[in-house]
Image (spheres, rainbow, N blue to C red):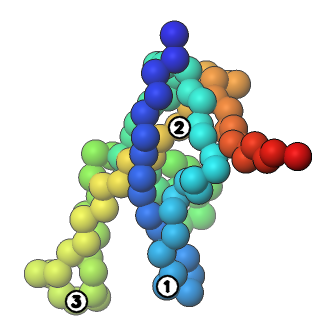
Amino acid sequence: ATTVYTYSDFVDDLQGNTKDLISNNLALYVKKGSFTCDYAMIIAREKAGQDAKGFVMDELIRKKAKGDDDQVELLSAPFIRPETPGSWAVIEVMEKKAY
C-alpha cells in the first residue's frame, strides 16, 4: 500500500531569493521506517590535529558574538538520513501533452 503526503517548505538561495525546497514536478518515494531523524549534526574536531568527525545532539548552543555571553544561537534542525540503502527514489512528474 502507498500513502501519499504533501509537503511544502522553502529555502533562500545565496542571492536571497526564496524557492521551493522540492519543486512541484518532483516526488519522493520512501519506504516506511527506512529513515532516521537526528538533530544538530555538525562536523568538527574535538582537539587540534585530530580528524574531523560527525557529532549528533538534540540541540547545539554556541556563542553568537565573541565576548557576549548573553547572546547565543540555538541550532536544532533535523538531519534526515536513510537507514536502508536503496530505500527511496526521486520521481519526476512529466506533463502529459495531447498530440
Separation of residues labelled 2 and 3 (CA atoms):
36 Å
Give the residue drawn at x 43%, y 40%. Answer: 6
The residue indicated by pointer 2 is 81
- Mark 2 vs mark 1: in front: 1
The local secondary structure at tag 2 comes to strand
Separation of residues labelled 2 and 1 (CA atoms):
27 Å
Give the residue drawn at x 31%, y 61%. Answer: 75
* Residue 55 spot, x, y in % from top left: 44, 48
The residue indicated by pointer 1 is 16
Looking at this view, name the residue that lies furthest to the top.
1
Looking at this view, name the residue that lies furthest to the right.
99
The residue indicated by pointer 3 is 67
* Residue 61 spot, x, y in % from top left: 25, 64
- State how many labels appear: 3
* Residue 53 spot, x, y in % from top left: 55, 50
Question: Does residue 27 show up?
Answer: yes
